[in-house]
Image (cartoon, rainbow, N blue to C red):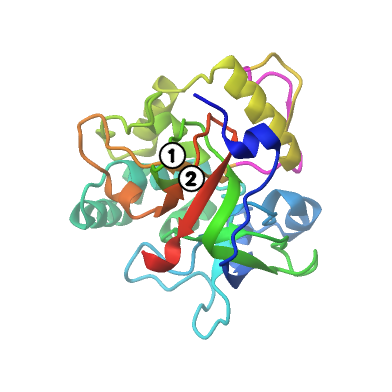
Amino acid sequence: MSANLASATSTRIESAARHQIPVKVSYEHLLSWMAFDQTRMQKEKMAVCMHKDDLAIGCSRPVRRNENGRGNQRNKPYPTVVSTLASMEPSARHYLIRLLHNPRTFADRDAFVRLVERRMDHWDPSMNEVCRKQIIEMPEFYFVGVSVGLAYAHPLSGDNVCTAMIGGLITVLNGAFEVHTGDQMHWIWDIEVPCFDPKGRRLDPIEESSSFAVAQFLSTHDPRLAEDAARRKQFHERGNGVYTAGAVGQVESGTVEYNSKRLVAFPKSLKPATDGDYRLGDRMRVFGKAMSNARPFEMMDVMLSRQSL
């Protein structure tokens, strides 16, 4: 694949027409995902902040129809957003993966939500109260924009409001899959990468509705990046405080993760699943078009089109 303008010249695309709005980092959600530890939240402020070029993911409305939003979202002047899942419990992450991976229709998704709501003990018999609360209050994530500033999660760490670009041309970091010019772009959490094949197509649905089944599915489909892609990923993760001392591609070997930002969102080109159908969770998260080619973890140009979706 030929190099794009952003990577070849180390420059950023500029857009004359910019649609921007102020957004506020959600203190309530991130505090819940850090097990309500405010001291840790302040000490590891860079692990939960929203930095420049991060995808601003909205979290104002909950998945469960009968659940109030986390905190009072009514009459808030700015959309509440996050750029990371912080330290969300594993069972809650598995719930989110299953919610985004399997359903083809809203009826399928609502049926899964009701099933877990009725049988929490079946989803994870060893679930603690923090995890239960995270599942019950799981937000309906949606794309808001791309951050062009810095905002902190805890109000004592600094300003928790920054500007997000919702329309125009912008240069962002690609995720774990190749992108071609003209591709429709949607976003995924990096914990979803094992749900795709090397070509970026979703794998077959997860059969059982349990946290153990999702964990087993992820372990059997753990992707291995090519050597050059692993180097680029390692290079860009330094900016998030992740330092790998082990061999290239061996992410678990000698990795320093203190105060590091993990579980973030990345852009990805929209492709049908291996069965030829599109998943509901992918179609709902389309936000723009690719304006250049990009290899995994390479800078790319994107036309944000959220205002027209």
Of 213 and 153, which appears nearest the observer?
Answer: 153
Looking at the image, which residue is at 65% across and 32% down?
8
Q: Residues within 10 Å of mark 2 (few under 14, many from 20)?
A: many
**Image quadrant assignment for residue 216:** top left
Residue 278 on image: x %, y %: 25, 43
**Image quadrant assignment for residue 5:** top right
Residues in magenta, as a range = 249-262
Q: Earlier in the sequence, mark 1 or mark 2?
A: 1
State if disc 2 and disc 1 touch (CB < 8 Å): yes
Residue 95 on image: x %, y %: 40, 46
| Residue pointed to by mark 2 | 291
| Residue pointed to by mark 1 | 181
Which element type, helix, strand or loop, lies under badge 1? loop
Asked if one can make out residue 241 in the rendered structure from this viewpoint, the answer is no
Q: Is residue 218 left or right of residue 232?
A: left
* Residue kind at label 1, given as amino acid type: Thr
Q: Is residue 285 left or right of residue 167?
A: left
Q: Is residue 105 left or right of residue 19?
A: left
Residue 189 on image: x %, y %: 49, 44
